[in-house]
Amino acid sequence: MKLIINTKAFPSFDPATLQEILGVLPYWVHEYTLLGKDANIVDFMANKYGFGRLYEFKGSVLDDGTYSYPDAPDLPYVGKIKTPNGNAYFYEYAMLALPLPNGTHFVTRMD
């Protein structure tokens, strides 16, 4: 799995600790890149999660991977993984941005 940790945004943390904080989510996205390339990544992740449909958060993912929502502090990504449709980004608070074929991201929370 090629998980890239954003040490620039989180310089006081050990990269291994940051990876551990992300839990199983990067592993599920990696599994998608290996097994689910023909599947919808949102459906794939919802199936792995096992609690039904994923809720989509509004806001946007900036070109540098930062999640931006009006009237809230921007969230830099903690880690990212390249998928067939672009980078999946992992944030604090179990938030993640799943890349869609149209170039946008489906932002959700899986805690």
Image (tube, rainbow, N blue to C red):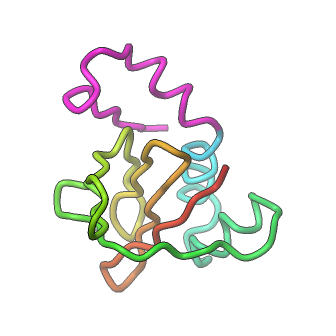
Across and down, in percent, residue 71 comes to 27, 65
Q: Which residues are magenta?
A: 1-23
Across and down, in percent, residue 69 comes to 31, 67
The residue drawn where x is 66% and y is 72% is: 54
Farthest residue, direction bottom = 102
Q: Main secondary structure of the magenta part?
A: loop
Determine whether 51 is above or below 89 in the image: below
The residue drawn where x is 39% and y is 72% is: 105
Determine whether 104 is above or below 65 in the image: below
The residue drawn where x is 46% and y is 68% is: 107
Farthest residue, direction front = 71
The residue drawn where x is 42% and y is 60% is: 83
Q: Quadrant of residue 68?
A: bottom left
Left or right relative to 57: residue 71: left
Left or right relative to 16: residue 104: left
- Of the pair 13 and 43, the residue shown nearer to us: 13
Determine whether 8 is above or below 29 in the image: above
- Of the pair 108 and 43, the residue shown nearer to us: 108
Across and down, in percent, residue 100 comes to 42, 77
- Of the pair 93 and 52, the residue shown nearer to us: 93
Across and down, in percent, residue 36 comes to 62, 67
Count of numbered tags = 0
Residue 5 falls within the magenta-colored stretch:
yes
